[in-house]
Image: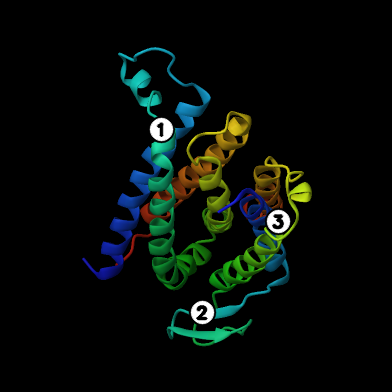
């Protein structure tokens, strides 16, 4: 296993943690549990969303930082293969991933601000939608990264 | 961090990033094959040239300065800033990128 593969695995693990935190938050803001939950889904959405905000910011920054490091290897070893194989949808999906992830970075200060304690009820919709956009960005990035890794893994 | 900075940064960053990508206003270029950084937009040499980092750097500076200036505005002005503009502009930028990159999926 080379260092790129190790970095990719760490990047993926951080992304999984980020996915979990953001998905918990999204469910907690859109369908909050009204009474003590007994089911798995009920407990999943009954978390106090505000307690995830700092973790989401840190995980997003760390995941993006590692993604930026391995992006260079993608450009040299993976993208050229996608172009040679004329896999334009896969290449385009990654282009969207890079732009969505960059826009998500720009949303982090606002996201953190609107999740500050005590939560302002008048900003509930802004908070929910910002969280949902970040969750979409992370889910898209994770799935696209996973698919591209299946097409052409690192260290091949 | 306060509300004017958070709101204006989000709006300015999304707009600046879209403009930077479309017009290629990268603060610096990275050449991954030779592990070299160069100031501004440079042509590819010995492999691809990467502008993504430079676009984000330019956008971050623009948004940081704009957000900083917003904190200097009087409260009577900043209280009119619309919190929803943060996600509306970001979402619009994402849709714009889908449109700009549609050629990857429709050909």
Instruction: Give whichever of discs 2 and 3 has the lower sequence position.
Output: 2
User: For the point 53% across and 56% down, which residue is it?
Assistant: A105
| Image position, residue B70 (x, y; %) | 71, 58
Residue closer to the observer: B37 or A50: A50
Picture quarter with the C terminus of chain A: bottom left
> Are labels 1 and 3 on one chain?
no
Closer to us: A53 or B49 = A53
Please rate how many residues cluster around mark 3, counting C-alpha atoms within 10 Å: few if below 14, some from 14 to 19, many from 20.
few
Q: Residue at x 41, y 47 (%)?
A: A54
Of badges 1 and 2, the one in the foreground is: 1
The image shows residue B28, relative to residue B5, as above or below, that is below
Which residue is at the far left? A1
**Which residue in the protein does label 2 denote?**
B30
Tell me residue A46's x, y (percent).
39, 23
User: To which residue does mark 3 refer?
Assistant: B100
Give the vertical position of A51 relative to A152 (above or below): above
Q: Are marks 2 and 3 in one subunit?
A: yes
Q: Report the residue at 39% width, 67% height from top.
A: A70
Residue B54 pos. (x, y %): 58, 73
- The residue that label 1 is drawn on is A24
Q: Front-most of B104 and A140?
A: A140
Q: Nearer the viewer, mark 2 or mark 3?
A: 2
Q: Quadrant of residue A20?
A: top left
Q: The disc numbered 3 marks a residue on which chain? A: B
- Mark 2 burial class by Cα count in 10 Å: few <14, some 14-19, many 20+: many
Name the mark on residue B97: none
Element marked by disc 2: strand
């Amino acid at each position: 296993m080379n260092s790129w593969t190790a970095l990719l695995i760490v990047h993926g693990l951080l992304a999984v943690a980020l996915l979990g935190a953001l998905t918990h938050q999204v469910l907690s803001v859109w369908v909050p549990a009204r009474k003590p939950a007994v089911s798995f889904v009920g407990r999943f959405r009954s978390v106090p969303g505000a307690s995830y905000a700092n973790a989401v910011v840190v995980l997003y920054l760390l995941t993006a930082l590692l993604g930026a490091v391995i992006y260079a290897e993608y450009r040299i070893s993976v993208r050229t293969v996608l172009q040679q194989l004329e896999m334009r949808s896969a290449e385009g999906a990654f282009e969207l991933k890079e732009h969505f992830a960059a826009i998500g970075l720009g949303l982090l200060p606002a996201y953190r601000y609107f999740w500050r304690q005590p939560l302002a009820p008048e900003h509930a919709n802004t908070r929910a939608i910002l969280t949902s956009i970040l969750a979409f960005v992370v889910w898209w990035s994770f799935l696209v990264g996973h698919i591209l890794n299946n097409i052409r893994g690192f260290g091949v | 961090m306060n509300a004017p900075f958070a709101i204006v940064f989000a709006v300015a960053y999304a707009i600046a990033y879209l403009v930077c990508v479309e017009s290629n206003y990268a603060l610096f270029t990275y050449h991954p094959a030779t592990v070299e950084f160069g100031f501004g937009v440079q042509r590819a040499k010995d492999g691809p040239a990467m502008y993504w980092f430079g676009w984000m750097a330019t956008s971050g500076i623009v948004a940081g300065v704009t957000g900083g200036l917003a904190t200097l505005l009087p409260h009577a002005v900043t209280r009119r800033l619309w919190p929803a503009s943060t996600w509306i502009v970001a979402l619009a930028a994402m849709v714009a990128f889908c449109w700009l990159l549609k050629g990857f999926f429709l050909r």
